[in-house]
Amino acid sequence: MTPAARSPISSTRTNWAKLGFADTWKGSFMDEQSKMYELEFPGPELSSEDGQGPVLIHGLEGFSDAGHAVRLATTHLRESLESELVASFAVDELVDYRSRRPTMTFKTDHFSAYDAPQLNLYALRDTAGTPFLLLAGVEPDLRWERFVTAVRLLAEQLGVRRTVGLSAIPMAIPHTRPLGLTAHSTNKDLVAGHHSWPGEIQVPGSASALIEMRMAQHGHEAVGFSVHVPHYLAQTDYPAAAETLLENVVEVADLQLPLVALGEASARVREQIDEHVADNAEIEGVVRALERQYDAFVTAQEQQSSLLAGDEELPSGDELGARFEQFLAEQAGNDPGQPGNGQPGND
């Protein structure tokens, strides 16, 4: 059964009025703080058999989405599980269109379509029927603090027990080695078993990181995962990174998520990349150099070596990435019926 054919999540809905939202304001923006979003009525049913509140997963497309891992993960969840819209954020208040121009379609002699950016909160149920929330779409360019406050207040009204953030960062690592992952939380119990980042660094901020930090500052359980993506694949759909993110979500959120299709997509893309590497001596040499650098890091990990810089002279991630993008585009163009672009399907 496809997601579109499934029955609604529940006929027993959240009473927005009891949560402080008036039903009489249906279809309009609410009070000053909630002008960031518009609620869908009636509200979703989020109660579970154990009486616990839902987990909120947030994954925003933008700066921290190397390999498009976040987009692949959130799209996969929405397409493979029953889902319904809870709230729509006002992207006109949050997005700088000139820095991230939406796509428009021009047909013959007129503009026929406009791909408007979206940023929405969804209610989903995992394969066992457990409800959870998913915040997905474009990362805001503007008004981060107002946006994060709106997310926090919505989470509090909906009884969210834990938030889980998804991000992906480019690293100088080869695709032939296991993907690394950085887990982060002010609650050490939530990241137990994961390696800590050696030392302190300054990094560019993201809206998801700010959600995690502000939620923790207000006493909520907040955790995040940043998967490490080979830097030369940062601009290419890389489903293995999305699979790694969701595998960790399963553990920390106690959800049952369908991952078979992502695993199959990962295997197909890996096969394509290996084929291209084998046919290009220069790229093969670079990958082997990255393997040596990676293996040296693992060996010397107790000495807090860094993967952010290596001793060998290597082409930039952009240079390698351009070559892989061209190769993968050619593969997709040769057989459009195959998911060679890394897009996962439904389980």
Image (spheres, rainbow, N blue to C red):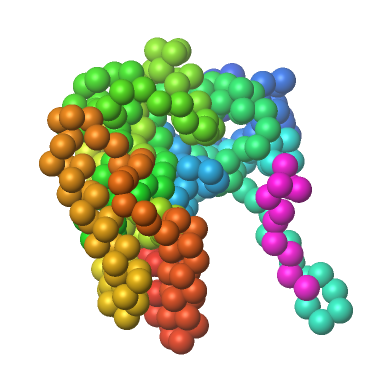
Res 38 → quadrant: top right
Residue 24, position as x, y percentages in the image: 70, 29
Residue 96, position as x, y percentages in the image: 72, 42
Vertical order, 160 against 272 (above or below): above
- At 29% from the left edge and 67% from the top edge, which residue is drawn? 285
Residue 325, position as x, y percentages in the image: 47, 69
Q: Looking at the image, which is closer to me, 171 or 145?
A: 171
Vertical order, 271 against 297 (above or below): below
- The reply to whether the magenta stretch includes residue 251 is no
Extreme-bottom residue of the structure: 334
Q: Looking at the image, which is closer to me, 109 or 128?
A: 109
Would residue 65 be seen by someone viewing this image from the given angle? yes
- At 32% from the left edge and 45% from the top edge, which residue is drawn? 310
Residue 219, position as x, y percentages in the image: 40, 12
Main SS category, magenta section: loop
Left or right placement of residue 262 versus residue 321 in this view: left
- At 55% from the left edge and 46% from the top edge, which residue is drawn? 62
Left or right placement of residue 4 versus residue 89 in this view: left
Left or right placement of residue 152 versus residue 45 in this view: right
Magenta range is: 96-106
For the C terminus, the quadrant is bottom left
